[in-house]
Image (cartoon, rainbow, N blue to C red):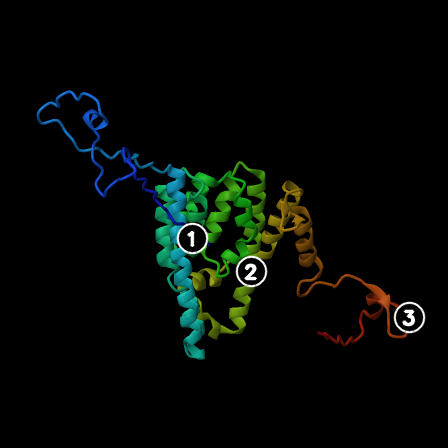
Amino acid sequence: MYRFGAILLAASIFMGCSDKATETAEKVTPAAAGETAEPAEKGAATESVTATEPAVKPTPAEAAKSAFDALQAEYKKSEAAFRQKVQAAPRDEQMALFMSGGEKKEFAVKYLDLAKEYADTDTAFPAVKFAAENGDVEVSTEAFEMIVDKFGDDQQLVGMLRSFDRTAQLPERKHEDFLKNLADNSNNQSVKGSASFALFQLLQRTGEMKDALASQPEMAESIPEEARNYILMDRGNDFDEELQTMLTNVAKNFADIEFGGKTLGELAEEELFVFKYLSVGKIAPDIEGKDLDDEPFKLSDYRGKVVMLDFWGDW
């Protein structure tokens, strides 16, 4: 967060003061200096005029940064107060209070307004990004649409897409629509590929959350209605095949694009391997190693036999 202070320097100009200057500076006439003074015209002004420099109007970029930094400071103060409120609440109320998000939605409106007011400055993107990630359905949907329309081909979108799984921790329809729009319409290959893989991540997590709610339905009450309805919607029996098709497309068309320390090609191949070998009902890939007696063995040696797996950890 940033704090911006606008400081206006006022300069006072003092002229014509002698060594014996008094509180009020008097005008020195030629007669006082031993010269012949010409008579002053009747009514001539005798007061000195103080010159002032005109105020410099900030550029749109400067005005945008000043407004953004001031809003950031206000938001930071609000978040600190909200954290204290959550910590002070009874333990059984903390989760519901935390899920409410504090004043994020109210601030999202302010950030969106700022982004629209200064749409042609560098401040517009971080402002509309905040609105998209923290607003209610109406505000965030408008913000996502603005991002697609104004920044759909912008390289800085890639950073947002790499962390989109955190942005959409509770997935909603607006997230899917946003990613599909970028994947279909962006002219930037990095943005297009990143949006395609982020869409896969979103849908995959949605399926996992739906399975979790099926086994623990009581959890559904703690999820906001928009997210709950989206998570529980019926996606048909071909959902896994659709996800694999998406990964195949990413591996084929965007393999060399970097995404979080790896290429999209590498990430897509890893996920396809999971679908092929490590999903429920699939035959596990064969492995080789040595047992506790230092004897070589293969997993396939135990096919058709009862095998006990012992999972453990040491921290």
Seen in the picture, residue 190 relative to 211 is either above or below; the reply is above
Mark 3 Cα shell of 10 Å, populated few (<14), some (14-19), many (≥20):
few
Which numbered dot is residue 173?
none
Residue behind mark 2: 205
Q: Between marks 3 and 2, how big is the CA–CA gap?
A: 41 Å
Q: Between marks 1 and 2, how big is the CA–CA gap?
A: 37 Å
Does dot 1 land on a helix, a strand or a loop? loop
Residue lying at the far left in this picture: please name it: 42
Q: Between marks 3 and 1, how big is the CA–CA gap?
A: 65 Å
Which numbered dot is residue 3?
1
Q: Position of residue 303 (x, y in %)?
A: 81, 69
Seen in the picture, residue 125 relative to 306 is either above or below; the reply is above
Q: 96 or 280, which is in the foreground?
A: 96
| Quarter of the image where the C terminus is located | bottom right
Q: 16 or 167, which is in the foreground?
A: 16
Q: Position of residue 108 (x, y in %)?
A: 38, 54
Q: Earlier in the sequence, mark 1 or mark 2?
A: 1
Q: Earlier in the sequence, mark 3 or mark 2?
A: 2
- The residue depicted at 42 percent of the width and 56 percent of the height is 134
- The residue depicted at 38 percent of the width and 53 percent of the height is 71
Q: Are marks 1 and 2 in contact (CB under 8 Å)?
A: no
The image quadrant that residue 16 belongs to is top left
Q: 250 or 72, which is in the foreground?
A: 72
Q: Position of residue 154 (x, y in %)?
A: 51, 39
Residue behind mark 3: 295
Does dot 3 land on a helix, a strand or a loop? loop
The answer to whether residue 27 is left or right of residue 154 is left
Residue lying at the far front in this picture: please name it: 34
Q: Nearer the viewer, mark 3 or mark 1?
A: 1
Q: Amino acid at mark 3?
A: Glu
Seen in the picture, residue 88 relative to 53 is either above or below; the reply is below
Q: Amino acid at mark 2?
A: Arg
